[in-house]
Amino acid sequence: MLAGKRILLIIGGGIAAYKALETIRRLREAGASVTPVMTRAAGEFVTPLSVASLAGAKVYTELFDLTDEAEMGHIQLSRVADLVLVAPATADLMAKMAQGHADDLASTLLLATDTPVMIAPAMNVRMWEHPATRRNAEMLAGDGVRLLGPEEGGMACGEWGPGRMAEPAGIVEAVRSALAAGPLAGRRVVVTSGPTHEPIDPVRYIANRSSGAQGAALARALAALGAEVVFVTGPATAPRPAGVEVVEVQTAREMLAGVEAALPVDAGIFAAAVADWRVADAAAQKIKKAPGGDAPTLAFVENPDILAAVARRAAGRPRLVVGFAAETTDVVANATAKRARKGCDWIVANDVSPDTGIMGGAENAVTLITDAGAESWPRMSKDEVARRLAGRIAEALE
Ligand code: CTP
């Protein structure tokens, strides 16, 4: 699937460098050739010998290595690849990239390259969340660098949060979709998915039955056609799609922020089951039962409508905005009205009445509503719905 593709792999100096070894193995298994470059710090975590053995190729480390310059200059080295992959990308390497430093081989190659660049950041959670790293990540995304991860979880340093490098399997998937000559190559798409959780107090929340399966299938199908996908997901039970940028959120307001951070995009697909209301003043402490007291009364306020907010943007509206409509009665009529009300281009309507088994199930029966009218599709797997819809999206963005 990556036959004949050449990957220039820059390994940064972090504990996640050990995952670079597995990444090399998987890239080569998929048919790619890997030219490894290690920063000096990377050599503290993995040895050039293991990297060279797995890559079956020479490892480049020094900028001013005369032998290398005689064989292949650094400019040439930066150009011989179909993709430059930085894994792990440390906070320091990201800062250098954002500022255009060129004081070692890795940063020089990154400045000199004219091929697409993908980075898999890995660092301590505080470093990832530091405003400086946030700024650098934003600048790099603006420069067209594809960021993959980091993922949330336990870290080697004992802390928990976003900062773990994406898994090698996901990295290889992302490389494959970045290099796929699919109809959506070069297109950027944001997909929302799953339920939202709206807190009542620190231990209780309001949720819904969405599993996130349809949204995840869509993200996978769009990536398979070559799109760069930002997947903004609530706390869904469905496995996260590989090879896409995953943004984990809890509430509707966080989901809106995640979507806005992903803009500009060519298309926005809003498959999430967003809570329409949140509790007005979520309690900071657990609400206690007063002895013999009354049950608490919750006051609600309306959440922002993410789909409508994006569809009605005066500047930077995606070319295609697709909403979903979860209905239990008069599906087509309600969804048609919803399309007009929200200002989106298409609505994918489905009947989520409990007896259909659609919400939380593996199948879906949808009606696609566009300005050409309503088109009912037969009941099929959510994966098949996703593939068909991705195909239609590709046609619309041609
Ligand atoms: N949606 C959204 N933000 C919200 C509510 C809904 O982005 N706060 C999006 C959903 O992702 C979906 C579409 O709007 O794409 C319709 O969602 P749905 O729940 O069917 O409709 P509502 O707007 O909630 O209307 P109602 O509950 O009256 O059916």
Image (cartoon, rainbow, N blue to C red):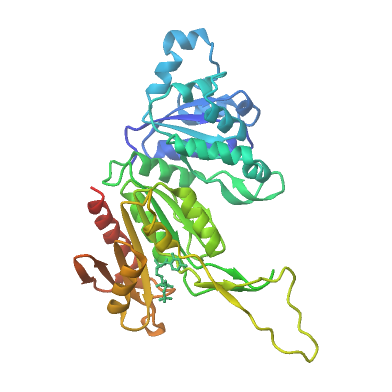
- Closest to the observer: 185 or 294? 294
Where is 148 relative to 323, above or below?
above
Task: Where is residue 354? Give x, y as percent.
Answer: 41, 83
Viewer-side residue, 233 vs 34: 233
Q: Nearer the viewer, residue 376 or 134?
A: 134
Which image quadrant for residue 288?
bottom right
List x then y, in percent, for residue 286.
Answer: 74, 73
**Which corner quadrant of the image does residue 33 belong to?**
top left
Tag count: 0
Residue, far right: 291
Residue 129 visible (yes or no): yes
Q: Residue at x 59, y 37 (%)?
A: 18
Ligand 1 image-quadrant field: bottom left
Question: Is residue 213 placed above or below 47 in the rendered structure?
Answer: below
Would residue 365 be seen by someone viewing this image from the given angle? no
The N terminus sits in image quarter? top left
Residue at the front extreme? 314
Position above or below: 160 against 30: below
State the residue lying farthest toward the bottom. 292
Residue 339's x, y, as percent? 32, 68
**Residue located 39% across and 55% down the image:** 313
Q: Position of residue 274 (x, y in %)?
A: 48, 68
Please state which of residues 321 and 353 is positioned toward the viewer in this rendering. Answer: 321
* Residue depicted at 50% across the width and 71% down the height: 275
